[in-house]
Image (tube, rainbow, N blue to C red):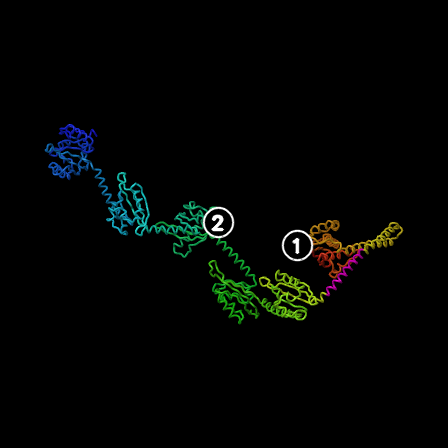
Amino acid sequence: MSDRGTVTETTVLEDENDSATRQRYRTLTELLDDGLYRLDATGRFVAVNDVLIERLGYTRDDLLGEHVTTIFEDADRDRVRDALADCRMGNRDGTTTLEAVVRAADGRRLTCEFRLQPIAVDGEGRGVLGLARDITAQTERERELAESERRYRTLAESFPNGVVTLFDRDLEYTLAAGQGFADLDADPADVEGQHFRDVVPEETADALEPAFRAALEGAERTVELEFNGRIWSVRTVPVTDGGDVSAGMAVAREITERKNRERELAKYETIVETINDGIYVKDEDGRFTMVNDAYASLTGYSRAELVGEHASLVVDEATLTQSEARREAMAAGDATTPTMEAMIQRADGEQVPTEGTFATLRTGAETKQIGVVRDITERKRMERDLRESEARFRLLADNLEDVVWLSTTETKEILYINPAYEELWGRDSAALDDDPRAFADGIHPDDRERVMAAYADLPDDEFDEEFRIVTPDGEHRWIHARAAAVHDEDRDVSRIVGIAEDVSERTERERALEQSERRYRTLAENFPNGAVGVYDTNLRYTLTRGAVLGDRLPNADRLEGSRVSDIFPEELVADLEGVLRAAVEDGETGSITIEFDGRNWRVWAAPLQDCDGEVFAGLSFTQDVTEQVERERRLEELVAKLEESNKRLEQFAYAASHDLQEPLRMVSSYLQLIDGRYADALDDEAEEFLAYAVDGAERMRDMIDALLEYSRIETRGDPLEPVDLEAVFESVLDDLRLQIEDADATVTADELPRVEGDADQLRQVLQNLLSNAITYSGDEPPDVSVSAERDGDEWVVSVHDEGIGIAAEEQDRIFEVFQRLHSCEEYAGTGIGLALCQRIVERHGGDIWVDSTAGEGATFSFSLPAVESAQ
């Protein structure tokens, strides 16, 4: 700067006499950044500083002595001359200032601001002192700013659907424009120059102010607010000048429709995300551009995994081809349903049946494919179950004896009728295809009008009628038909289902029941030698009938309405009330024998139940059993005598058999002595006679032993208890092992049960039967099988053989004592074995019998009481 402030040759202030003043001006000259020059009275340069020379590019010699106008553009020279003239003549007070364009040495045009100050010494004009400041850049900026403001204003005034404003640091609007003012109660011209709070309501101003101030701080903000009944989006940005924020700009756009669309879109997006159906959008290449959560869940992939992937990720090529064919058909206008079923391949490999509905959305040049997919696994299961159910229904209905039919809701078409119709009606079901009410032709004329009137009320009312039909061959049958509406899951009537059954037998039974009731009433009224009564829970008789009423028992008028305690003596009431009350309170049937008025009476009490099984009353039967009691008393005396006689007989049998043993032993011993001592002296005939005698004695001893055993079955047996027949059978096989091996016999058995019995005696029964089966097997090796079958509370055990069999006329005799069908020479034995088995089985409360044909084997069966499962 000091170099530029130096004036060579002639200084700008060379005429200053005061050296101090001159020094001050020289210093000022050196510090100035502007061009400084001095003109003489004629306007020629007499001095210039270095700044001016540097700015204009001339040399000092080029300028000194030249008129100042030579550096100006032609258009400005006159204005410069006028300004110099005014300055020299003192027409203006102070400094003269003007802007003008000068031409630099290199031809550049510079816009400068010139300030002219006249120089006077002692009142004499000595020239002009001037200051030249280059304002080219500033002028250019101002021009550009003005141009920019024009563009901004034009843009702002043309801003569609919104408002543009500029505001200064005082928050006053300096610009307001935009087509949005057409919808506002304000004029842009009135807004400019006002504080923003004077233009908008306080609530709106409070929302705007933070954004305005943020813009003035250099930040951008966006705020949404409601104003004048509309929704606006206001964006504020800073306006900078050379990096510094000089103002703020607000762009307000009316977004009411957009917000409404966004709300609608949000609503639809909410629907899309909350419905259970999967929704997807694909581009023209078949790649997913959007899927909802339901679709992602259905496929097992995440949204991120699906978006951008081709649809072949989840469906096969056949499905893609089919869906594309349907889209093309729909686009061509064919009446093709946009719904199809397909299997989706989940991420875990599972196949999921789905139903998809799709559509094509065209937005400009872009085409989107939209699909809605529903998991129909449950529907498929229900359809499968329905098919199975209908198959079961048809299978069941086709094999029912009752007529089953399905019809439409208005009964105008028979959808199904089973074969029983032709069997019951005796008419061809094909006639129902042409006329669904042809079945009425078979209804008896006297019933037809009533039945068809009730049938016409379907489906509003249920159909439940009994009527007669007449078959083509003239047979009359009673029919009970019922029909009702079937509702679907929406509670709408979907069809009519009906069933008709032949109740001819029931009708006959009802008639028979009526007759039976009349007979029972007659029987009750004439109940022989007794009476019948019905009583309530208070033991009060409500009905009595019987032949002895009014004779040996009080009459009906005395009994009906009276309690038991009011009729019978006190000593009988306790016993009677016990059995009567057990019937009405516990549902138990019981009886008791009492004495009343010198006679014996048997009283039975039983509960009377309604259709629900609830006891509502009691039924009593009272019969005079005086003669029966007397007979029973005599019978008991006779039984006691018989038991005593049997006891004596048993004692006798034991004593006889025991006492007979000694003589037999003696006879047998002496016969053996004779045989031992005199065998050589005896001829063959004597030997034979002796052998007969010994054998007879032995057989006599065996018979006595068997008889003794037979007499002890009742007295010497063990108490009956649970017995495992399987174990008993195995023990018998061990005892018979030698006989089985000698006969080369085969003995098999099913699994045998547990029974109530005496194990030793049952062992004896099985051993006798098995031994007989082997013994009487004939010429072939014995083949014996043992089985058991449950019959109620008993087990029937059978021993079957393939032996010689038993003739039918001999089968009852074989169970008698000492009865033989064969001689001792043919088969050994005492003839008491089966009688022994019979008595043992009878002791167990069972029976024994044989099924046989001579020459074809025999099956001996006996019944035994079963063991309860708890045991």
Task: Specify the amino acid type for callout 1.
Answer: Glu
> Who is closer to the viewer here, 645 or 732?
645
Seen in the picture, residue 124 relative to 304 is either above or below; the reply is above
SS type, badge 2? strand
- Any magenta on residue 652? yes
Characterize the local packing of mark 1: few (<14), some (14-19) or many (20 or more) Cα atoms within 10 angstroms. Answer: few
Dot in front, 2 or 1: 1
Q: Which residue corresponds to mark 1?
A: 868
* Quadrant position of the N terminus in the picture: top left
Where on the picture, by quarter, is residue 4?
top left
x, y percentage for residue 47?
A: 15, 31
x, y percentage for residue 209?
A: 30, 45
Where on the picture, by quarter, is residue 660?
bottom right
Where on the picture, by quarter, is residue 75?
top left
x, y percentage for residue 559?
A: 63, 68
> Who is closer to the viewer here, 263 or 628?
628
Q: Which residue corresponds to mark 2?
A: 351
